[in-house]
Image (cartoon, grey):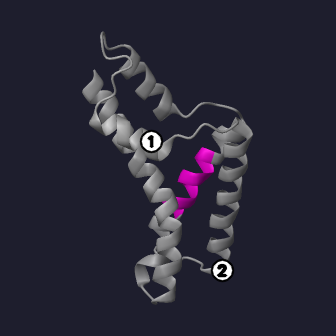
Amino acid sequence: MSELANLVLVLHALLVLFIVGGLAAIWAGAAMRQNWARNRTFRTTHVVAIGIVATLAVLDVPCPLTVLEDYLRNGTAGAAGQPGFIQRWVSAWMYYDFPGWVFTLAYVAFLLAVVLTWRLIPPRR
Protein backbone atom coordinates (compact mmCIF):
# COMPACT_ATOMS: atom_id res chain seq x y z
CA MET A 1 0.00 0.00 0.00
CA SER A 2 2.95 2.36 0.32
CA GLU A 3 3.00 2.65 -3.48
CA LEU A 4 -0.60 3.87 -3.39
CA ALA A 5 0.28 6.26 -0.58
CA ASN A 6 3.15 7.62 -2.69
CA LEU A 7 0.78 8.01 -5.64
CA VAL A 8 -1.67 9.97 -3.49
CA LEU A 9 1.20 12.12 -2.21
CA VAL A 10 2.38 12.89 -5.75
CA LEU A 11 -1.18 13.68 -6.87
CA HIS A 12 -1.51 15.95 -3.84
CA ALA A 13 1.73 17.71 -4.77
CA LEU A 14 0.50 18.17 -8.34
CA LEU A 15 -2.71 19.72 -7.04
CA VAL A 16 -0.68 22.14 -4.90
CA LEU A 17 1.45 22.96 -7.93
CA PHE A 18 -1.69 23.56 -10.04
CA ILE A 19 -3.17 25.90 -7.45
CA VAL A 20 -0.04 27.88 -6.64
CA GLY A 21 1.57 27.71 -10.07
CA GLY A 22 -1.76 28.34 -11.77
CA LEU A 23 -2.08 31.80 -10.27
CA ALA A 24 1.44 32.76 -11.32
CA ALA A 25 0.80 31.29 -14.78
CA ILE A 26 -2.41 33.30 -15.18
CA TRP A 27 -0.62 36.55 -14.43
CA ALA A 28 2.36 35.69 -16.66
CA GLY A 29 0.09 34.46 -19.45
CA ALA A 30 -2.06 37.59 -19.28
CA ALA A 31 1.05 39.79 -19.38
CA MET A 32 2.19 37.95 -22.51
CA ARG A 33 -1.34 38.11 -23.99
CA GLN A 34 -1.72 34.33 -24.09
CA ASN A 35 -5.29 33.15 -24.72
CA TRP A 36 -5.01 30.16 -22.37
CA ALA A 37 -4.64 32.54 -19.40
CA ARG A 38 -8.27 33.55 -19.93
CA ASN A 39 -9.59 30.06 -20.65
CA ARG A 40 -12.83 29.74 -18.69
CA THR A 41 -12.50 26.00 -17.99
CA PHE A 42 -8.96 26.36 -16.66
CA ARG A 43 -9.87 29.39 -14.58
CA THR A 44 -13.03 27.82 -13.17
CA THR A 45 -11.16 24.64 -12.23
CA HIS A 46 -8.49 26.78 -10.58
CA VAL A 47 -10.85 28.89 -8.47
CA VAL A 48 -12.91 25.82 -7.48
CA ALA A 49 -9.76 23.96 -6.39
CA ILE A 50 -8.54 26.72 -4.07
CA GLY A 51 -12.12 27.33 -2.97
CA ILE A 52 -12.39 23.73 -1.77
CA VAL A 53 -9.04 23.95 0.03
CA ALA A 54 -9.98 27.21 1.78
CA THR A 55 -13.45 25.94 2.70
CA LEU A 56 -12.04 22.76 4.23
CA ALA A 57 -9.55 24.83 6.22
CA VAL A 58 -12.18 27.29 7.50
CA LEU A 59 -14.45 24.39 8.51
CA ASP A 60 -11.46 22.65 10.15
CA VAL A 61 -11.96 19.56 8.00
CA PRO A 62 -8.74 17.66 7.25
CA CYS A 63 -7.72 17.42 3.62
CA PRO A 64 -9.13 14.18 2.19
CA LEU A 65 -5.91 13.52 0.27
CA THR A 66 -3.84 13.80 3.45
CA VAL A 67 -6.27 11.53 5.30
CA LEU A 68 -6.15 8.96 2.48
CA GLU A 69 -2.36 9.06 2.29
CA ASP A 70 -2.04 8.66 6.06
CA TYR A 71 -4.47 5.72 6.00
CA LEU A 72 -2.60 4.01 3.17
CA ARG A 73 0.80 4.66 4.72
CA ASN A 74 -0.05 3.68 8.29
CA GLY A 75 -1.95 0.61 7.16
CA THR A 76 1.24 -0.82 5.66
CA ALA A 77 3.03 -3.15 8.06
CA GLY A 78 6.66 -2.28 8.72
CA ALA A 79 6.70 0.96 6.75
CA ALA A 80 6.09 3.33 9.64
CA GLY A 81 9.03 5.64 10.30
CA GLN A 82 10.79 4.65 7.08
CA PRO A 83 9.66 7.04 4.36
CA GLY A 84 10.58 6.25 0.80
CA PHE A 85 12.35 8.59 -1.57
CA ILE A 86 9.19 10.19 -2.97
CA GLN A 87 7.54 10.56 0.41
CA ARG A 88 10.61 12.13 2.01
CA TRP A 89 11.12 14.82 -0.65
CA VAL A 90 7.53 15.65 -1.49
CA SER A 91 6.53 15.72 2.18
CA ALA A 92 9.43 18.06 2.99
CA TRP A 93 8.26 20.35 0.19
CA MET A 94 4.56 20.33 1.17
CA TYR A 95 4.24 20.01 4.93
CA TYR A 96 5.37 22.53 7.51
CA ASP A 97 4.97 22.57 11.28
CA PHE A 98 2.87 25.70 11.84
CA PRO A 99 -0.34 26.17 13.81
CA GLY A 100 -3.49 25.35 11.86
CA TRP A 101 -4.70 28.96 11.81
CA VAL A 102 -1.63 29.97 9.78
CA PHE A 103 -2.64 27.60 7.00
CA THR A 104 -6.28 28.66 7.16
CA LEU A 105 -5.26 32.31 6.85
CA ALA A 106 -2.91 31.50 3.96
CA TYR A 107 -5.55 29.48 2.09
CA VAL A 108 -8.21 32.16 2.48
CA ALA A 109 -5.75 34.90 1.45
CA PHE A 110 -4.77 32.86 -1.59
CA LEU A 111 -8.44 32.33 -2.47
CA LEU A 112 -8.95 36.10 -2.27
CA ALA A 113 -5.95 36.61 -4.58
CA VAL A 114 -7.45 34.14 -7.07
CA VAL A 115 -10.85 35.86 -6.90
CA LEU A 116 -9.21 39.27 -7.35
CA THR A 117 -7.29 37.86 -10.32
CA TRP A 118 -10.60 36.63 -11.78
CA ARG A 119 -11.86 40.19 -11.58
CA LEU A 120 -8.70 41.88 -12.89
CA ILE A 121 -7.98 39.30 -15.59
CA PRO A 122 -11.44 37.94 -16.39
CA PRO A 123 -11.79 34.71 -18.33
CA ARG A 124 -13.26 34.90 -21.80
CA ARG A 125 -16.78 33.69 -22.41
Residue 43 visible, this angle: yes
Asked whether residue 50 is drawn in magenta, I would say: yes
Q: Is residue 43 left or right of residue 84?
A: right
Residue at x 48% of width, y 80% of height: 28
* Residue assigned mark 1: 92
How many neighbours does mark 2 have within 10 angstroms: few (below 14), some (14-19), or many (20 or more)? few
Q: With 99 as the anchor, is 9 left or right in this view?
A: left
Q: Is residue 35 magenta?
A: no
Residue 94: image x %, image y %? Answer: 48, 44
Image position, residue 79 (x, y; %): 31, 17
Question: What amino acid is at disc 2?
Answer: Leu
In which quadrant of the rendered view does residue 109 lie? bottom right
User: Do labels 2 and 1 touch, CB within 8 Å?
Assistant: no
Q: The residue tagged with tag 1: helix, strand or loop? A: helix
Using the image as rendered, state which of residue 23 and residue 99 is in the foreground. 99
Question: What stretch of residues is rendered in magenta?
Answer: 44-53
Give the labeled residue for mark 2.
120
Q: Position of residue 51 (x, y in %)?
A: 62, 51
Considering the whole magenta stretch, tell me its main secondary structure: helix
Q: Tell which of 32 and 87 is nearer to you.
A: 87
Mark 1 crowd level (few <14, some 14–19, many ≥20, 10 Å Cα): few
SS at badge 2 = helix
Give the amino acid type for the residue marked by disc 1 in the picture. Ala
For the image, the number of numbered tags is: 2
